[in-house]
């Protein structure tokens, strides 16, 4: 997996769900502290001022955020989550 997705940076906690058409997994050693992997194609959890990072293959097909809008980056470039709605 060569692509990276980073989410976080908001002072207020936000819930997220991210789906790809390939596979996605966290880059941290203990992903269950920060995120729940719903399947090999979806991650969900909560994030605040700390950033979570995931590696993935394929394309991002959906980014759903609830609460404050955290920063979302794909390969270091800011993206608008509204452009990724299933």
Image (cartoon, rainbow, N blue to C red):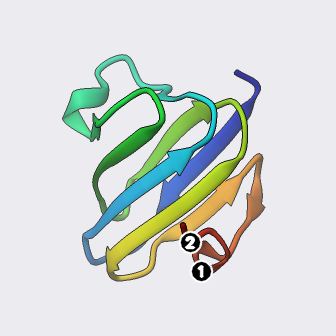
The label nearer to you, 1 versus 2, is: 2
Quadrant for the C terminus, please.
bottom right
The number of callouts visible is 2
Binning the other alpha carbons within 10 Å of mark 1 as few (below 14), some (14 to 19) or many (20 upward) gives few
- Disc 2 crowd, CA 10 A, few/some/many (<14, 14-19, 20+): few
- Left or right of residue 54, residue 33 in this image: left
Residue at screen point 46% across, 72% down: 70
Front residue (pair 46, 83): 83
Q: Residue at x 48, y 27 (%)?
A: 25
Asked if marks 1 and 2 touch (Cβ < 8 Å), the reply is yes
Question: Is residue 82 in view from this perspective?
Answer: yes
Q: CA distance from mark 1 to mark 2?
A: 6 Å
Q: Give percent across and percent down for residue 15.
A: 28, 65
Measured as percent of width and height from the top left, residue 29 is found at 37, 17
Residue identifier under label 2: 85
User: Relative to 74, does residue 54 appear above or below in the rendering?
Assistant: above
The secondary element bearing badge 1 is classed as helix
Locate residue 78: give its quadrant.
bottom right
Q: Residue at image x 27%, y 77%?
A: 12
Q: Secondary structure at mark 2?
A: loop
Front residue of this view, candidates 86 and 79? 86
Up the image or down, 26 lies above or below 77; here it is above
Q: Quadrant of residue 30?
A: top left
Question: Which numbered circle lies on residue 63?
Answer: none
Q: Is residue 51 left or right of residue 33?
A: right
Pointer 1: what residue? Answer: 82
> From what the image shows, is residue 45 above or below residue 41?
below
Judge left or right: residue 17 versus residue 63: left
Residue at 70% in and 21% down:
1
The residue positioned farthest toward the left in the image shown: 33
Residue 37 or 9: which is nearer the viewer? 37
Q: Is residue 72 above or below residue 5?
A: below
């Amino acid at each position: 997996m060569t692509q990276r997705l980073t989410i976080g940076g908001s002072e207020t906690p936000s819930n997220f769900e991210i789906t790809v058409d390939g596979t996605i997994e966290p880059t941290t050693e203990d992903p269950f502290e920060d995120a729940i992997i719903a399947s090999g194609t979806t991650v969900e959890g909560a994030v605040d001022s700390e950033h979570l990072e995931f590696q993935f293959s394929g394309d991002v097909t959906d980014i759903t955020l609830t609460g404050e809008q955290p920063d979302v980056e794909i390969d270091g470039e800011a993206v608008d989550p509204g452009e990724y709605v299933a």
